[in-house]
Amino acid sequence: MTTQVIVLNGGSSSGKSGIVRCLQAVLPGAWLAFGTDTFVDALPASMRAGDGGIEFAADGEVVVGAEFRELEAAWIEGIAAMARAGARVVVDEVFLGGADSQARWRKALDGFGVLWVGVRCDAAVATGREVARGDRVAGMAAAQAELVHQGVTYDLEVDTTHAESMECARIIAAHVG
Amino acid sequence: MTTQVIVLNGGSSSGKSGIVRCLQAVLPGAWLAFGTDTFVDALPASMRAGDGGIEFAADGEVVVGAEFRELEAAWIEGIAAMARAGARVVVDEVFLGGADSQARWRKALDGFGVLWVGVRCDAAVATGREVARGDRVAGMAAAQAELVHQGVTYDLEVDTTHAESMECARIIAAHVG
Amino acid sequence: MTTQVIVLNGGSSSGKSGIVRCLQAVLPGAWLAFGTDTFVDALPASMRAGDGGIEFAADGEVVVGAEFRELEAAWIEGIAAMARAGARVVVDEVFLGGADSQARWRKALDGFGVLWVGVRCDAAVATGREVARGDRVAGMAAAQAELVHQGVTYDLEVDTTHAESMECARIIAAHVG
Amino acid sequence: MTTQVIVLNGGSSSGKSGIVRCLQAVLPGAWLAFGTDTFVDALPASMRAGDGGIEFAADGEVVVGAEFRELEAAWIEGIAAMARAGARVVVDEVFLGGADSQARWRKALDGFGVLWVGVRCDAAVATGREVARGDRVAGMAAAQAELVHQGVTYDLEVDTTHAESMECARIIAAHVG
């Protein structure tokens, strides 16, 4: 089946966004790129700071509420509809719920050619990159490095610990059918 | 019919984004906010600089290509699907094609309660705000101030020339059914 | 004396940055623009989150520590040295310490032609703009609206409550000697 | 002599900013961080788009004018004055003029303990990172990779081709006297 959606899953500061931009540059044709950040930016400011939305604990843990989950379900349906309308889409995700998160996406994307990609990065290296970026809550990289992959199954995994975004993008592109 | 989608249309630097954030703050419940900027950010970098995508002429005119229109159609279907899934959505748009642009959205949002809002701003004032922002191509505000409203019909119009974003948001919120 | 430094002082979301960009556009010659934001961005991330640096209280109050004051003194000397080297500079400041803050700048800029400009904005209007911007700690606009002007003396005051950034910039530019 | 200023020089996308943030995190005490980007952001918008300022050629080459050089000289004097006032400063630079650029800084920083650090990155790798960042003019990384080091002498060189920002920062920190 022709790949129409690529879902990248990885922890904060694992290098997903960089891979996405490289994928858009190396894949034939035009692919739209959306991600957790697109969705979070679409939320009311009050939900980005608690209030049924997202809370960042002092240790970098991220907790989301019920209202967040409802809106997220609608967001996922929206991405699926873009694919149904013919767009090719790269999704950059953080499966905080591991297998449950993947199940939500899998159900919505049923019937499309989806390439599931795990983006790994050693927790210590991701933590260093979190400091280097300077725009993320400290501790998220370490808290999510393993958590987001629990129970998730992939067609392909890349590891940014020792590989550049562009290298990872080329590996992924070679698996796009 | 209950309002489920609010579509704001206005030229560059007319103050749409500010109104959207205020709407999210004053409307009861959680509304997702998306806009032309969300869509443009999702495009490959090459399309944001010509190549079948967007071109910014020296006079601030914006020209879009066929590939842009196809992806945009999918994007619009995605927003409609989010509404179908139960989310309330504010869309911040720039109808470069005037009535044609509105027709594309109207068709996709058929069956939902939509509040169409025109966001006006005097061209000279919008041009001053463009300079004050410092992050937009010079001339877009003036080029779009009238253009985007040609042939478009609204339930409501606000004018930011002499009114604050918050005032406009309260006026719009009062019309949400 | 020829004006070589323009110091704008006003609370958060009073519209200083917009006025600065307009000033750079309308003033003859090239003026460098620096501000509190430039200095804060230059601090280590740890100081931007407490640790002898800046703390944002829940009510929007901003508290700074001793180490912050020492580095700020060096920063002010740096701006003065740029003026001494011949550059014309616009400084965008938030005098959290009122008259004491002004005294620090006045001492460092002794001997230069300085235009002191107060940027006023009604607290309620600034609060609405804070919501519209969506990137500032809620409450700062209201907390600072009056506070930063206490005991400060100006050559000129502008009020953005009912005037555009560009209008204010033209008024200020007319006073530049 | 105690190190009071660290000057990092490297091409676009060689990883300087990440190293600077890591340095601020690992060095004892508080260091201010400034760079070419700080200076360019301080320029009038018109100078960032030609007009005696900066021009980005289609091949990524950057050309600066005479007015840029005058303001830059004042900027460098400003940084030196901050050091004179007691601040420790990390400067993140792009020596487009190679040895001439270094000479300008060397003269202004005469008398201070300065650690000169070259930040190298393989041109092909830097080009990939430029794509991954998505916010830089394409071609700058390749155009500057060798150019900025011509005739420049260092106390220390790091290479980000195979080393993380944090690793490079620790190496540099170990040389700070």
Image (cartoon, coloured by chain):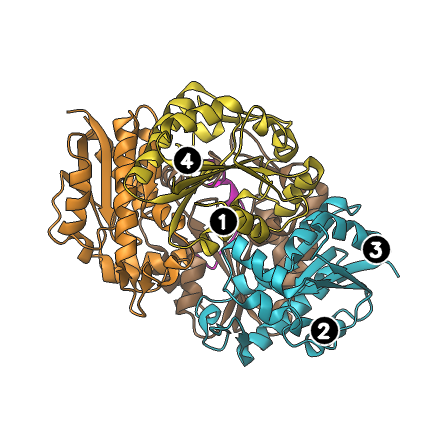
Chain colours: A brown, B cyan, C yellow, D orange
Gap in Å between the C-alphas at discs 1 and 3? 44 Å
For mark 4, does the 10 Å Cα neighbourhood hold few (<14), some (14 to 19), or many (20 or more) residues?
A: some
Which image quadrant is residue D62 in?
bottom left
The span from disc 4 to disc 2 (Cα, nearest Å) is 45 Å
Q: Amino acid at mark 2?
A: Gln
Q: Is B130 displayed left or right of D72 in the figure?
A: right
- The residue where tag 2 is placed is B102
**Residue at mark 4 to residue at mark 3: CA–CA distance:** 43 Å
Disc 2: CA contacts within 10 A as few (<14), some (14-19) or many (>=20): many
Report the amino acid beneath label 4.
Phe
Reading the image, the residue beneath label 4 is C39
Q: Are marks 4 and 2 in contact (CB under 8 Å)?
A: no
Are the numbered discs 4 and 2 placed on the same chain, yes or no?
no
Residue at 46% from the left image edge and 56% from the top image edge: C25
Q: Is residue B103 above or below residue B45?
A: below
User: On the same chain: label 4 and label 1?
Assistant: yes
Of label 3 and label 2, which has the lower sequence position? 2
- Residue underneath mark 1: C173
**Along the line of sight, the residue nearer the viewer: B96 or A112:** B96
Earlier in the chain: of badge 4 and badge 1, it is 4
How would you rate the neighbour count of disc 1 (Cα within 10 Å): few for under 14, some for 14-19, many for 20 or more? Answer: some
- Dot 4 falls on a residue whose secondary structure is helix
Q: Is A149 colored magenta in this rendering? A: yes
- The answer to if C122 sits in the magenta stretch is no
Badge 4 vs badge 3, beta-carbon distance below 8 Å: no
Residue kind at label 3, given as amino acid type: Val
Q: Chain of mark 2?
A: B
Which of the chains bears the disc numbered 3? B
Outermost residue toward the bottom?
B66
Evaluate whether label 4 is on the same chain as label 3: no
Q: Calculate the distance from the C-alpha at mark 3 to the C-alpha at mark 2.
A: 19 Å
